[in-house]
Image: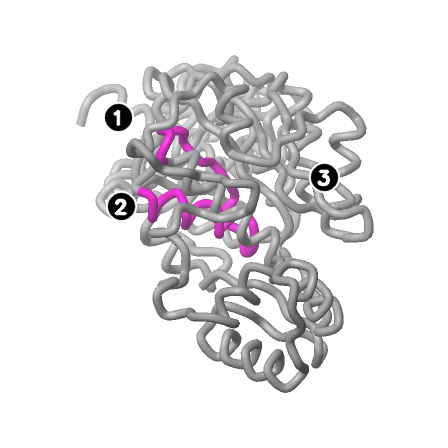
Amino acid sequence: MTKQEREKAYIHWLYQAAGMGNRAFLRDLEQAGTARSVYEMAARGVLADKLHERYRKKAERLHNAVKDYDVIGRYEEMTARGISMVTLGEAGYPKRLAAIHDAPYVLYYAGSLPEDGRRSVAVIGARNCTEYGRVMAETFGTILARAGILVISGMARGIDGIGQNAALRAGGYSMGVLGCGVDLCYPQENRGLYERLLTQGGVCSEYPPGTAPRAMLFPPRNRIISGLCDAVLVLEAKERSGTLITVDMALEQGREVYAVPGRATDALSAGCNKLIRQGAGLVTTPEELLEDLQAQLTGTPGQTFFAGQLSLPIEDTCMETTQIQGKGMELLGLLDFQPRSMETLQEAYRNAYGRAIGIPQLCHTLVQLCADGYAGQIGGSYYLKKRN
């Protein structure tokens, strides 16, 4: 083990024993010397003499934390599990994150950290997103990844996880910033995403391995999400939501903030619409965002990412269009990612095709589209387009 790795083993002990939230205490400890010297003073019971009196009880806790603790063994056990750590000021520490005023002193990670020389965007939004939000997250995640953009998010259910999954499926890189130890998957429903991140991207946290998820740990981690990025993209958010905490931190860090607009009556678009009103960049397509980021699309020649409609390239959609014929194809073109009533669809069909469609045929066709997974039924007589 190198001298640097040995010191990191003592930092790992100190970070666990002192408590990662005690930044002032950790700064005061720096005056006492290296992490190893702090350990040795704590073992001899003389650390309290080196610190301000307000830290006497904490010094006692460090003294107790020395007992039966195998510093080197515990560190090697952690690295053997595929978990690494990088400290502020170390060569491998992400440069974007190091530049923020409250960068975490220690960053634990599994997988790989984002490359400093590549553009990165945080894709964030509501946990309980709508079908519209889901489609936008999949679309932006996919196309950003194809353009070589790193996608950063919090691995939460909803927009975060959907965007990250889409980026990974497109062959891109994504980093999940956790509000718990990197050895724990939270939420459990994103287990598949967590495992893909470990092989195709990474997960990171300022909290030591084994730290259980708690509500108080999630707001601080948001500064890391925005700190790792060049820009933050909000897809759906209520007017008051945790997503906007990340936005506030991003603005403090000097990051660009973008938002996708939504309908004025949709609660989950209220936060995005408000951000746009306050000066956030309005984007409706990934190309608009990429243009702002001065990124180059890497799609194959002839691909059309958007054609006046929210859709991915035809090979990426959930449907095999050859399986949908006649009335089914016509009705699918009239469905939206927001629910539409049968009466509205009847009128839209007449306006679009110049002929009427009866209720029995309309019902039969919509039921078939739902059974095939192309549409969803809400509230009995409302239908919307879906993507699997």
The mark that comes first in sequence, 2 or 1, is: 1
Between discs 2 and 3, the one toward the N terminus:
2
- What residue is disc 2 on? 199
Is 256 a magenta residue? Answer: no
Towards the viewer: 351 or 38: 351
Between 289 and 180, the residue placed more toward the observer is 289
Amino acid under disc 2: Thr
Q: Name the residue under label 1.
A: 5
Label 1 SS: helix
Q: Is residue 128 visible?
A: no
Quadrant position of residue 388: bottom left
Q: Is the residue marked by circle 2 packed among few (<14), some (14-19), or many (20+) residues within 10 Å?
A: few
* Residue 309 visible, this angle: yes
Label 3 belongs to which residue?
A: 272
Q: What stretch is highlighted in magenta?
A: 146-170
* Mark positioned earlier in the residue sequence (3 or 1): 1
42 w.r.t. 66: above or below: above
Amino acid type of disc 1? Glu
Alpha carbon separation for disc pair 2 and 1? 24 Å
Disc 3 is placed on an element classified as helix
Seen from the viewer's position, the closer of residues 167 and 242 is 167
x, y percentage for residue 68?
35, 46
Residues 238 and 330: in front is 330
- 190 is higher (above) or lower (below) than 260: below
* Alpha carbon distance from label 2 to label 3: 33 Å
* Helix, strand or loop status at disc 2: helix
Residue at 45%, 30% in the rendered image: 42
Side of 311 where 76 appears, left or right: left
